[in-house]
Image (cartoon, rainbow, N blue to C red):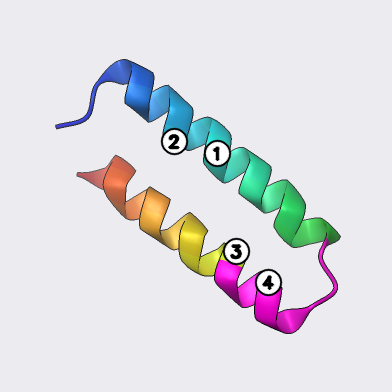
Amino acid sequence: MISNEEMTMFIKEIYLLIIQYNRCDSADIKNQINNEILILSEVIKQ
């Protein structure tokens, strides 16, 4: 199980990735960002 500090860090990173996703024009990069968001979301769920 992840600690509260790690949880906070992952949530902040997801937030930053969402901002990057919304600003990005490249479909390929958006796909990569989306994959990173999904990976971090899975870590948080555990």
- Residue 42: say if magenta: no
At a point 31% along the width and 54% down the height, the residue shown is 42
The CA distance from mark 3 to mark 1 is: 11 Å
Label 1 residue SS:
helix
Please identify the quadrant where the C terminus is shown: top left
- Residue type of the residue flagged with mark 1: Glu
The reply to whether the C-beta atoms of the residues labelled 4 and 2 are less than 8 Å apart is no
Residue farthest to the left?
Answer: 1
Residue underneath mark 2: 10
Q: Which mark is residue 33?
A: 3
Please indicate whether residue 18 sits to the left or right of residue 6 in the image.
right
Residue underneath mark 4: 30
The CA distance from mark 4 to mark 1 is: 15 Å
The CA distance from mark 2 to mark 3 is: 14 Å
x then y, percent, for residue 26: 79, 78
Q: Which residues are magenta?
A: 24-32
The reply to whether the C-beta atoms of the residues labelled 3 and 4 are less than 8 Å apart is yes
At a point 32% along the width and 41% down the height, the residue shown is 44
Is tag 2's residue or tag 3's residue first in the polypeptide sequence?
2
Is tag 4's residue or tag 1's residue first in the polypeptide sequence?
1
The reply to whether the C-beta atoms of the residues labelled 2 and 3 are less than 8 Å apart is no
- Residue type of the residue flagged with mark 4: Lys
- Residue type of the residue flagged with mark 2: Phe
The CA distance from mark 2 to mark 1 is: 5 Å
Please indicate whether residue 33 sits to the left or right of residue 38 in the image.
right
The reply to whether the C-beta atoms of the residues labelled 2 and 1 are less than 8 Å apart is yes
Is tag 4's residue or tag 2's residue first in the polypeptide sequence?
2
Q: Which mark is residue 13?
A: 1
Label 4 crowd (10 A; few <14 / some 14-19 / many >=20): some
